[in-house]
Image (tube, rainbow, N blue to C red):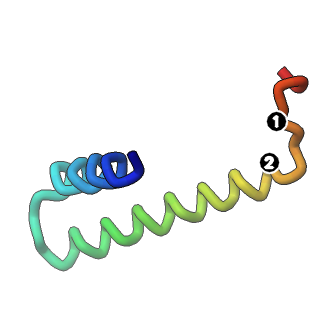
Amino acid sequence: MRAVATAAIASAFARVFPASSLQVKILKQVALACGAVVFVWLLSVTYGLDLSAGFF
């Protein structure tokens, strides 16, 4: 399942950034880094939050 999701994300990036210039590669890496930073920030913000079934 993860391989399918990873392949879907990779193909989406390939469609969005079809060119292989250096600027596009740098932009892609910056976008991935920003996504990783936002993901880690969301994890740190929700640290300790009770998300058990009784919470909802």
Residue at image x 36%, y 47%?
A: 5
Circle 2: residue type: Thr
Question: In this image, 9 relative to 16: left or right?
Answer: right
Q: Nearer the viewer, residue 31 or 4?
A: 4
Q: Quadrant of the C terminus?
A: top right
Question: In this image, 52 relative to 32: left or right?
Answer: right
Where is residue 46? Give x, y as percent: 80, 48
Residue at image x 48%, y 68%?
A: 33
Where is residue 9? Give x, y as percent: 32, 50
Residue occupying the far top of the picture: 56
- Callout 2 touching callout 1 (CB < 8 Å): yes
Where is residue 17? Give x, y as percent: 18, 57
Residue at image x 13%, y 74%?
A: 21
Q: Which residue is mark 1?
A: 51
Q: Nearer the viewer, residue 3 or 50?
A: 3
Q: Is residue 1 above or below residue 55?
A: below
**Disc 2 or 1, which lies upstream in sequence?**
2
Residue 31: name its quadrant. bottom left
Q: Is disc 1 placed on a helix, strand or loop?
A: loop
Where is residue 19? Give x, y as percent: 10, 64
Q: Which residue is mark 2?
A: 46
Residue occupying the far bottom of the picture: 22
